[in-house]
Image (spheres, coloured by chain):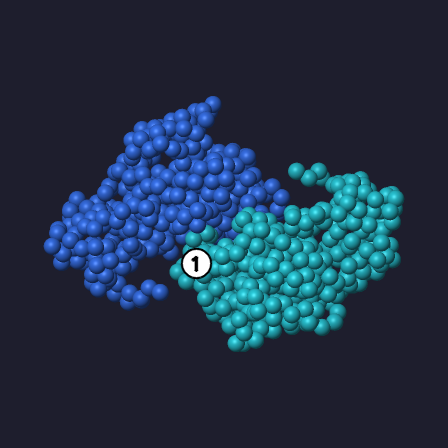
Chain colours: A blue, B cyan
Amino acid sequence: VTADPGPTTLRFSRGVPPPECIPSHSLAVHTVAVLDAARDAAFQYPPIGRYLGDPALRERLGAFHRVDPDAIFVGNGSLQVLDLLVSLLLLRSGEREVWVEAPTYDRALQVFQRHGARVVGVPVEPDGLDVDVLRGRLRFGTPAFVYTIPDFQNPTGVTMAESKREALVELAAAYGFTIVADIPYRRLRYHGTAPSPIADLVDPVGAARVITLGSLSTVLSPGLRIGYAMSDPETAHALASLAESTYLAPVPLCQAVAARCLAGDVVLSSIGRIRHLLRPRHDAAVAAVRSRLGGALLTVPDGGYYLGLRLRVQADETTLLAAARADGIALARGSAFFPPSEPTPTDTHFLRLPFHALDSGDFAYGIDRLARVCAQFAGSAR
Amino acid sequence: VTADPGPTTLRFSRGVPPPECIPSHSLAVHTVAVLDAARDAAFQYPPIGRYLGDPALRERLGAFHRVDPDAIFVGNGSLQVLDLLVSLLLLRSGEREVWVEAPTYDRALQVFQRHGARVVGVPVEPDGLDVDVLRGRLRFGTPAFVYTIPDFQNPTGVTMAESKREALVELAAAYGFTIVADIPYRRLRYHGTAPSPIADLVDPVGAARVITLGSLSTVLSPGLRIGYAMSDPETAHALASLAESTYLAPVPLCQAVAARCLAGDVVLSSIGRIRHLLRPRHDAAVAAVRSRLGGALLTVPDGGYYLGLRLRVQADETTLLAAARADGIALARGSAFFPPSEPTPTDTHFLRLPFHALDSGDFAYGIDRLARVCAQFAGSAR
């Protein structure tokens, strides 16, 4: 049990979207419309037996991402889809290793470990996965898959450069491993232009296999619990078969509401609104960190939810976090974003700072406090 | 892909409730009420971190089953809860065997096998699990758990007698295995009185551990995907922790709707209506089987969805099912309800006949056809 941080504590520890980024009113309107149009189906079992998800929803997701709807599998949130995918890819490849960006999404690490995978980290640079390290490791073995969050990565905010995406796809084709690209934040870009989706870089006749995970949690509603995998019809059906013997299928009402929201422009206008709301928070957060914590910022993300920091202090992580909490700052433990095999450095600590759910003034105030905490320790923040 | 059986085919193959047994109108009314009262929470992430499920829902489920709400874990349908439970119990016990009734629910078998368990069948008699066989096997080893559907079992319709429940609990205490009691059909009783819930037979200071799985799919709505485990707070929290790293938590809207439906008497009146609708179907189905297929009926269930038959014919199962299909009867493969280690008999076939979703006249007509199919083969149905 985490102790209640108290009302004055600034929470740099949570990744949930702020309420103003969820179009609850439109979601409610479309929920009522589904209840009017197809009430019986909404409360009945979802179809089973080679069921990839609501056909109307897959049609709309296909249009949204410009992919074949029959290559889309819809599941109970993208974490659950990842869980099914790990079973499938470990079995299919016969390999036990999963290679991830270090640091990466902590819950994904938990999923991989629960499946008995050996998780190996590949460092993240300011322009993404260190492809040279990856290439070097491939001389000694091949993973079941490489898991990447290529856009505004959780937890660093880093986006993988176009050239690295191309190199990764070439390596996947040459060595025969699968790329799992998790893209929940891709549409939340506040500045600049997006590199190509990794799946679009695959030579049509090439051997590279890319499986892209999408989520409606960031662009519409986390409460619907709708995530999906975009791959090929064979993989989609294999996932559906696993899902059917695990939880059957996602809630029909949620799928129908999501399909209507995609059809009725709710998602596109929600994305516009989120970008409008979060762009100034991003900019102010970057400015606050630069002014108070100097070179600690890993990169200027230009999108997503997170800033990644690397702080050098003369204290171990537990001491740093406790000192921050004593000063009213709740921080997520940065080491939790690294595979457990990685050695934890004693004087340089990774921190994930979510800027999306904090008012810009609160964020800056929190950074002030954090800088003060760092100054308590002999080494300075860099 | 199963060939389309055509419009005149009678489906004895599906277990989904008929639409008239789902109170869609009331569910819609309560959904709108939730949207009016707590729209933002409905579309936001469910809480995480030691989250057992919506507190209001657990409170109502606790009252419904007369158990401690803090010992209830709510998941995405009872199959998903079973999936989490298998991980937990295999790990906790260190054993690899799971003992099940033979036959049992086919999807549960799939879940156990997917987790790498060795599944061992214990025969089902007309009054439930053969406890003598179970006792004999315990001399040679102990399972991680015994999985039972004690009330109106899927697929046989059998209910475990009170004395067998007591014996099972005694054995669990003596040998230190867990009982997983799956009770989706318990409240759908059309005649007679119910034996005690297995969990109620545990001596308060005894060592027996019973985990009961409940579902709202049979008494309210399968589309909500709400199932739950009733055990002890420690097990509930262990399940919650597994869920959090698999799919986070069930859809908040569905949980809130279920809580309101339990509070507002929708569930109790739904149970009354289902019993009123299905009692005559049960009675007519029993009469039809008795008159046309004689002693093939395993038991008169007095509740639930299913009749279990054991047919003796001079044909293997595939031949029998193909002949039935040619005559317009779609049957589920009876051997799929047995653990794969069980030898498939060559001339005696188990059949599950769901009576709940068929009009009584259609059911009787199907039994006529089935009797005709059996008569095609040299041996007679018995």
Front one among A207 and B122: B122
Q: Is residue B231 left or right of residue A184?
A: right
Which residue is situated farthest in the top direction here? Answer: A205
Which residue is situated farthest in the left direction here? Answer: A378
Q: Is residue B284 left or right of residue B230?
A: right
Q: Position of residue A134 (x, y in %)?
A: 32, 33
Image vertical order of residue B354 relative to residue A202, above or below = below
Q: Position of residue A49 (x, y in %)?
A: 62, 44
Quadrant for the N terminus of chain A in the image: bottom left
Front one among B331 and B113: B113
Chain letter, disc 1 residue: B
- Residue positioned 54% across, 66% down in the render: B176
Residue carrying label 1: B241
- Residue positioned 37% across, 43% down in the render: A119
Image vertical order of residue A157 relative to residue A9, above or below = above
- Residue positioned 55% across, 39% down in the render: A238
- What amino acid type is highlighted by mark number 1? Ser
Does residue A173 show up? yes
Q: Position of residue B177 (x, y in %)?
A: 55, 64
- Residue positioned 57% across, 75% down in the render: B203
Image vertical order of residue A148 relative to residue B23, above or below = above
Q: Quadrant of residue B157?
A: bottom right
